[in-house]
Image (cartoon, rainbow, N blue to C red):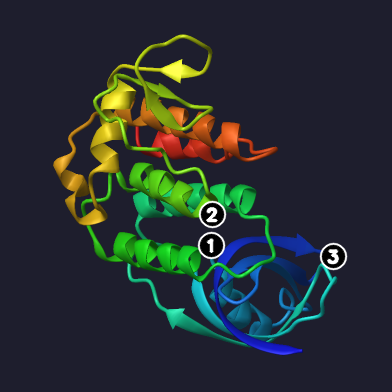
């Protein structure tokens, strides 16, 4: 059947000599992979591949066949054209990291319009704002709301956080309980928005430490989740 849907590009992979396999998060059907035939060996094809940069926001008409692993794109056009995300080296590093993380975290072929809207609006925020140093930290934290393991913020006065249970606790009486500067930052981020994120002042070392904590949290709650390989490049860019 033909389906019209918005989509965000998660990854692309060369297949054979001239084909591409593109993985997208679609508003209508969740994560889908598409085979783009012959797009790497013609001028017309290279124009088409320009649509499929990481995290590009598209309007697609697709030929969807249930139980198929690769689907067909019949029509493609840009839904939102980024001004800075693919040209600013720092934002490009964030995009590479987030795209890889989403590829690992989003596995379901199902509709989740709230999650799609979250991805769409936050990426547009990143594109249009200049105070984005802590963007990825808040992005990862708020994404857990849509993935189903947002931290329970009932007891923000407690000084410990249980990574496995996803809640603040009064004492460190078992494994996987953390405290200190990272938990102070977690409490700050739980109470903030993207527009107020520049008010949180932390240095590079603190930023990297909290990112490591968030990735550990993801590992606890997502089966087979591994930290993105692009994290090393990401940390070099932001060091």
Which numbered mark, 3 or 1, is in the foreground of this view? 1
**Quarter of the image with the C terminus in it:** top left
Residue 179: % across, % down: 35, 17
Q: Is residue 93 visible?
A: no
Report the side of 82 relative to 144 (left or right). Answer: left
For marks 1 and 2, give the CA distance. Answer: 7 Å
- Assign a secondary structure to mark 3: loop
The residue where tag 1 is placed is 54
The residue where tag 3 is placed is 16
Residue 59: % across, % down: 54, 83
At x 42%, y 30%, the residue is 167
- Counting residues from the N terminus, which is met first, the one under dot 3 or under dot 1? 3
For marks 3 and 1, give the CA distance. Answer: 21 Å
209 w.r.t. 1: above or below: above
For marks 2 and 3, give the CA distance. Answer: 23 Å
Q: Nearer the viewer, residue 44 or 72?
A: 72
Q: Nearer the viewer, residue 187 or 73?
A: 187
- Counting residues from the N terminus, which is met first, the one under dot 1 or under dot 2? 1
21 w.r.t. 91: above or below: below
The residue where tag 2 is placed is 99
Q: Is residue 23 visible?
A: yes
Which numbered mark, 2 or 3, is in the foreground of this view? 2
- Assign a secondary structure to mark 2: helix
Report the side of 118 relative to 105 (left or right). Answer: left
Residue 152: % across, % down: 39, 38
Q: Residues within 10 Å of mark 3 (few under 14, many from 20)?
A: few
């Amino acid at each position: 059947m033909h389906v019209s849907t918005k989509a965000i590009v998660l990854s692309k992979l060369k297949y054979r000599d001239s084909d591409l396999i593109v993985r997208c998060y679609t508003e209508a059907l969740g994560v889908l992979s598409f085979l783009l035939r012959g797009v790497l060996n013609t001028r017309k094809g290279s124009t088409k591949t320009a649509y499929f940069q990481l995290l590009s926001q598209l309007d697609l008409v697709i030929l969807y066949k249930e139980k198929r692993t690769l689907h067909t794109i019949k029509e493609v056009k840009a839904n939102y054209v980024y001004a800075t995300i693919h040209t600013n080296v720092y934002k490009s590093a964030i995009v590479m990291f987030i795209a890889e993380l989403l590829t690992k975290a989003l596995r379901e072929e199902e509709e989740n319009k709230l999650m799609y809207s979250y991805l769409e609006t936050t990426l547009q925020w990143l594109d249009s704002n200049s105070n984005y140093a802590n963007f990825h930290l808040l992005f990862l934290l708020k994404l857990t709301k849509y993935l189903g393991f947002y931290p329970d913020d009932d007891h923000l006065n407690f000084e410990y956080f249980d990574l496995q249970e996803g809640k603040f606790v009064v004492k460190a009486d078992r494994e996987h309980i953390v405290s200190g500067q990272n938990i102070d930052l977690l409490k700050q981020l739980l109470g903030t928005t993207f527009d107020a994120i520049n008010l949180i002042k932390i240095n590079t070392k603190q930023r990297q430490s909290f990112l490591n904590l968030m990735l550990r949290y993801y590992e606890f709650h997502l089966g087979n989740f591994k930290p993105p390989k692009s994290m090393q490049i990401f940390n070099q860019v932001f060091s």
